[in-house]
């Protein structure tokens, strides 16, 4: 038999096999995606990869579903290649894009930028994230896909086991007595120049002597620490009885997202005592807090803490949020508009605050450091050596978008 006859027979067989397909699975997939695009859950959705012959037969169903949900469609023969998916996943196949409004133009612009010559790995990663956002993926999912298909890793991949806030004092003895006696925290480690206290679970506060620390003590603090408790009134009465300076008195707002008050420690660090309530901005946070076992202090009345939020202050919130979500891999637990709360460890939270609206302001210098207990600090250090854009970074440390120093 001639080669041309064999080729003709192959085409007939292929077309016959496609005609026999009912495409029920693919139809269900694109109907689900079209509905999500209509609802605004996904700006852009991708149909399943198909051969050109298969898609020819499937196009009537594509048109029917797009009309049913009032969304546009575009037949794409060369989907953008990013770090989100393996190249082999759609090689030699076509996909249908479902979209609304100007989303297709956003995709075409992205495709053009990805086609630039000599694109750097960092630039491709940024554009890959942009494609992920077009597909409606949360940052956590984008991070997972990047880790599966590229050299990217975030801090979460190296096993976060605890968070320690470190403050610096001229009179360490006085500060230590305040936290051990007045607040009743458990002292877990100490030396001549430091004292480490357990707040709850894997959340710690360390007091460090200013001597030989590299700080002068004149730097703005640009930090506050919130103690999470369900015993606000008890703590407020206790601190008043102990003559502790109160910066903001107890505020209770029925139906609001949180109540609290703010005290001041011996050298001016702000201590917020806070209770969160069920509220639209706390819908992720409340189930997390419900799982936490409180830690009792030595204060009469069995006063306790569930955990802590270390509040950091920023000049520009967006870079701070992107760093926390993309580089550290943290997920948002509460959104207060000008303040965001991220879960760092089981009992320790990181709060990002707009420096123009919070209790403190942004400062390039700050009298605070944070230490992270990592399961695998060595591999994280190696990753930073190879990937960190900060040429001033020192070993086993990094700085965030606001210049806060993290050690591990």
Image (tube, rainbow, N blue to C red):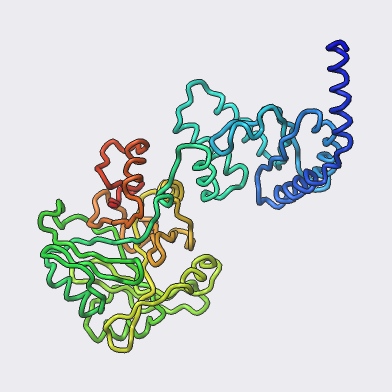
Tell me if residue 317 can be seen.
no
Q: Residue at x 72, y 31 (%)?
A: 94
Q: Return the residue nearer the eye: 266 or 204.
A: 204
**Residue shown at 28% from the left, 51% from the top:** 405
In this rendering, is residue 108 above or below 331? above
Seen in the image, is 338 located left or right of residue 284?
left
On screen, residue 354 above or below 231: above
Q: Residue 379's x, y, as percent?
A: 35, 45
Residue furthest to the bottom: 301
Judge whether residue 217 can be spotted in this image: yes
Q: Position of residue 40 (x, y in %)?
A: 67, 50
Residue depicted at 34% across the width and 48% down the height = 400
Indicate left or right for 150 with 351 as reference: right
Taking depth in this image into account, of 283 and 356 the one nearest to the observer is 283
Q: Quadrant of residue 115?
A: top right
Q: How many marks?
A: 0
Q: Can you give x and y, in whole percent of width and height, for residue 291 in the image?
A: 47, 72
Left or right: where 209 falls relative to 161: left
Residue projecting furthest to the front = 1
Compared to residue 201, the image places residue 57 above or below, namely above
Q: Position of residue 2 (x, y in %)?
A: 86, 10
Q: Nearer the viewer, residue 362 or 208?
A: 208
Question: From the image, which quarter does the N terminus lie in?
Answer: top right
């Amino acid at each position: 038999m001639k080669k041309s006859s064999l080729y003709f027979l192959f085409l007939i067989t292929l077309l016959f096999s496609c005609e026999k397909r009912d495409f029920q699975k693919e139809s269900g997939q694109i109907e689900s995606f079209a509905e999500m695009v209509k609802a605004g859950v996904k700006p852009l959705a991708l149909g399943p990869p198909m051969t050109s012959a298969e898609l020819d037969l499937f196009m009537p169903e594509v048109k029917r579903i797009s009309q049913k949900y009032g969304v546009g469609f575009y037949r794409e023969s060369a989907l953008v290649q990013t770090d989100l998916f393996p190249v082999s996943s759609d090689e030699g196949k076509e996909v249908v894009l479902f979209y609304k409004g100007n989303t297709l133009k956003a995709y075409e612009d992205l495709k053009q930028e990805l086609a630039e010559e000599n694109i750097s790995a960092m630039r491709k990663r940024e554009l890959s994230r942009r494609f992920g956002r077009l597909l409606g993926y949360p940052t956590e999912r984008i991070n997972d896909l990047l880790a599966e298909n590229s050299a990217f890793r975030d801090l979460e991949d190296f096993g976060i086991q605890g968070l320690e806030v470190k403050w610096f004092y001229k009179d360490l003895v006085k500060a230590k007595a305040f936290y051990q006696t007045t607040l009743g925290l458990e002292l877990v480690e100490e030396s001549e120049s430091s004292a480490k206290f357990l707040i709850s679970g894997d959340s710690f506060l360390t007091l460090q002597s200013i001597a030989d620390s590299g700080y002068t003590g004149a730097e703005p603090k640009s930090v506050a620490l919130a103690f999470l408790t369900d015993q606000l009134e008890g703590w407020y009465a206790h601190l008043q009885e102990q003559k502790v300076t109160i910066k903001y008195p107890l505020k209770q707002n029925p139906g609001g997202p949180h109540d609290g008050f703010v005290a001041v420690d011996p050298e001016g660090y702000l201590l917020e005592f806070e209770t969160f309530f069920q509220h639209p901005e706390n819908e992720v946070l409340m189930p997390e807090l419900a799982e936490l076992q409180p830690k009792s202090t030595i204060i009469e009345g069995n006063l306790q803490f569930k955990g802590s939020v270390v509040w950091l202050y920023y000049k520009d919130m967006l870079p701070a949020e992107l760093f926390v979500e993309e580089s550290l891999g943290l997920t948002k637990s509460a959104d207060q508009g000008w303040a965001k709360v991220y879960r760092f460890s089981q009992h320790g939270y990181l709060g990002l605050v707009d420096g123009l609206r919070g209790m403190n302001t942004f400062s390039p210098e700050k009298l605070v450091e944070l230490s992270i207990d990592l399961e695998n600090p060595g591999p994280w250090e190696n990753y930073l050596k190879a990937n960190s854009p900060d040429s001033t970074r020192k070993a086993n440390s990094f700085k965030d978008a606001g210049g806060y120093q993290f050690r591990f």
